[in-house]
Image (spheres, rainbow, N blue to C red):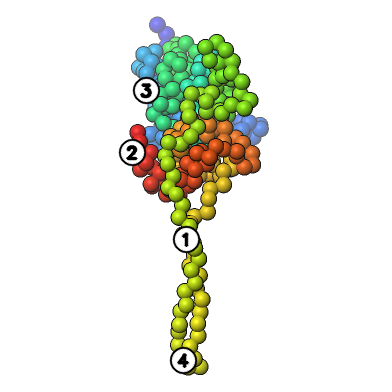
Amino acid sequence: MSYDRWAPYVPVAERRAKAAREMKKLAGKGMKIEPITVQGRKIARTFWGEAWCSHLEKFSDYENRLPRGRTYVRNGSVCHLTVTKGRVEAIVSGSKLYRVNIDIAPLKANKWKNVRKMCAGQIGSMLELLQGRFSDNVMEIVTDRNTGLFPKPSEIKLACDCPDWAEMCKHIAAVLYGVGAKLDHQPELLFLLRNVDHEELISAELDIKTATAVKGKRRRLAGADLSDVFGVEMEDPIKPRQKKRTSTRKVLVRSSSKTSGKRAVRKKSVVKNNKKAFTPTATAVARLRKSFGMNISQFAKLVGVSPPTIVNWESGSGKLNLRQRSLDALNQVAKLTPEKAATILKRDR
């Protein structure tokens, strides 16, 4: 057997220097170079990056081949990596520069619909989504091996122009890990890769036909309480304390004046102890929830309403027209400190 097709070994330092020169030439031709840089031994550090790598390592097709690329991605051999809709393109430094193309099938419509339905009302903001600050339930949904957001091996097509005959060479393995490292900084690229709109998870509204159907019949939303549609009472079971009005008292304080020798009388007003009532606007509700560091599901539980109700409140405009019990509940919650709110939520689990 002839081994003439294999290139001779080239030291890492020499490969790096050569790759740097080649990438500089490409940059000079107008190509935007996006290298993968890994600090330390850990390739991915955030929820999305770690979840990507962990997902791929679960499959027997990959678990024995992926480790070949760890050293390559750690030592900076992935000189360039871009993610577009359904495709990853990269340049990896080996004995020479090799081009890697990875095609990933779009997430099937029924899977995406199912993910949205199960996550309904549980992701409160774009920040929570991109930072991966979810409940355990949402994490299980989006990372599920078969029904989540990440692609299975059957949905991935691999190609590299190196002479290695293996379907997954070390250059491809390095690129797959490189995607995980890139998701650390740009998690939205996962949704672009799977051809779905991540903003659809924020409002997380159920399909209107599913949400309003009861025993095969559609229920009218007009004039109905939104929480009734989802089978959850709008009113908060917590009974707010009655406010005690403290009248303003005038206190006479007599003091001696050293300069005049005359006594002066000063009037001092006592500030009312009552805190100003909570004004229920969409912005105010969202601000209150975020001040507690809670997602929509957690805040809904604290207030005593359904998660879709909170979504509805926060997507409104101007002053919200709420039932008295809901307004009282918000007033009660608004008096809490973040620590107290967290304690109550934990106690009621």
Q: Earlier in the sequence, mark 3 or mark 4?
A: 3
According to the picture, the residue beneath numbered tag 4 turns out to be 258
Q: Nearer the viewer, mark 1 or mark 2?
A: 1
Residue at the image position 48 percent from the left and 34 percent from the top: 235
Q: Earlier in the sequence, mark 1 or mark 2?
A: 1
Labels 1 and 2 touching (C-beta < 8 A)? no
Residue 205 rendering spot, x and y as whole percentages = 55, 25
Q: Quadrant of the C terminus?
A: top left
Marks 1 and 4, how far apart at CA: 36 Å
According to the picture, the residue beneath numbered tag 1 turns out to be 246
Q: Amino acid at mark 2?
A: Arg
Task: Tell me if mark 4 has few (under 14), some (14-19) or many (20+) residues whose alpha carbon lies within 10 angstroms of its own.
Answer: few
Locate residue 12: give its quadrant: top left
Q: Earlier in the sequence, mark 1 or mark 3?
A: 3
Res. 347 mark: 2
In this view, the residue farthest toward the left is 347
Helix or strand or loop: what does disc 2 sit on? helix
Marks 1 and 2, how far apart at CA: 32 Å
Helix or strand or loop: what does disc 4 sit on? loop
Q: Nearer the viewer, mark 3 or mark 4?
A: 4
Helix or strand or loop: what does disc 1 sit on? loop
